[in-house]
Amino acid sequence: MTSDQGGRYGEPEGGSGAPEPGGWNAPPPPPQGWNAPPQGWNAPPPGWNAPPPPQGWQQPGQQWPGSGGYVPPPPPGTPEPPLTVRAGIGAFVATVVLGLVAAAVMYANWDQILDEAIARAGAGLSGSERETAQDVAEIVVQFSLVIGVVFTAVYLLVIWFAWRGRNWARVVLWVLGGLSILSGTAGLGGGTGVGYVDGLNVFSWLLTLAGVVLLALQPSNAWYRYTGWQRRYGPRR
């Protein structure tokens, strides 16, 4: 066999011995930087769509306005206070108004109320003990008026914060209202001795009870949750 009859071992030069099929082209090389998928990887079937991201999800690297991090979705609710909140806050405001009216009536009937308190404090006493009880009753009545004025100012401040959507103020109103309801229930058998003032106290007790119940209803709870979310994650004003 001579050198012009073929390549090494008798194969035709430039090939493996098998002719290439007609029209066949070698596949193009993969793009630069391409990595083959790992072993066992299966491509998604035709028509497959990626599932949508969960609610509240954000793209990596994005920043939410006002927080600089992840922001949970807002709870159900609206920025406007519902009827239960408006009525509940209104009931507490009405109790304050009735309290001021009662204080004015008590001041106008100061002598009658003081005599009633002294008579109750000195009942069954005589001599120096009765005089001491009368002095104590007079001091208690005067001190009660001063405490009432301070308490009214603090009460109005708490009511204002509750109207602004502060849940802690609502809790304070629950506590103060509950104590007022308990004390009013215990004192329903007594009174100041002035029928007009006693009637105002009964209306104030009913309004306090209504305010506590209205602020505990579901629409009120949803609104306070929403305002808390808005204050924490909403845009800064």
Image: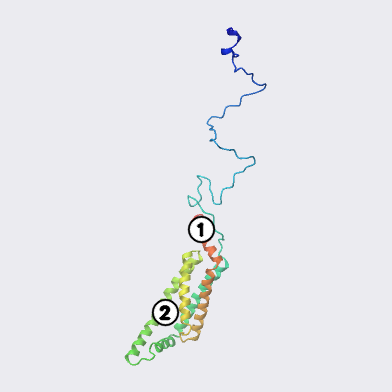
Which residue is rendered at x = 35% and y = 87% of the image?
Answer: 133
Numbered disc 2: secondary structure: helix
Between 136 and 16, the one nearer to me in the picture: 16
Residue furthest to the top in view is 2
Judge whether 105 appears above or below 62 on screen. below
Judge whether 24 appears above or below 58 on screen. above
Q: Quadrant of residue 25?
A: top right
* Residue topped by disc 1: 229
Between 84 and 197, the one nearer to me in the picture: 84
* Amino acid of disc 2: Leu
Between 54 and 178, the one nearer to me in the picture: 54
Q: Where is residue 81 in the image (x, y as percent from the top left)?
A: 55, 64
Residue furthest to the bottom in view is 126
Q: Which of marks 1 and 2 is in front?
A: 1
Which residue is rendered at x = 47% and y = 74% of the image?
Answer: 178
Q: Position of residue 13 (x, y in %)?
A: 59, 13
Q: Where is residue 201 in the image (x, y as percent from the top left)?
A: 49, 80
Q: What mark, if any, has residue 150 been given in the picture?
A: none
* Amino acid of disc 1: Trp
Q: Label 2 neighbourhood size at 10 Å, few (<14), some (14-19), many (20+)?
A: some
Numbered disc 1: secondary structure: helix
Q: What mark, if any, has residue 145 been given in the picture?
A: 2
Q: Do the residues labelled 1 and 2 touch (CB within 8 Å)?
A: no
Which quadrant, please, contains the N terminus? top right
User: Which badge, 1 or 2, is on the more N-terminal residue?
Assistant: 2
Residue furthest to the left in view is 128
Q: Label 1 neighbourhood size at 10 Å, few (<14), some (14-19), many (20+)?
A: some
Colouring chosen for the image of the structure: rainbow
Q: Position of residue 30 (x, y in %)?
A: 57, 29
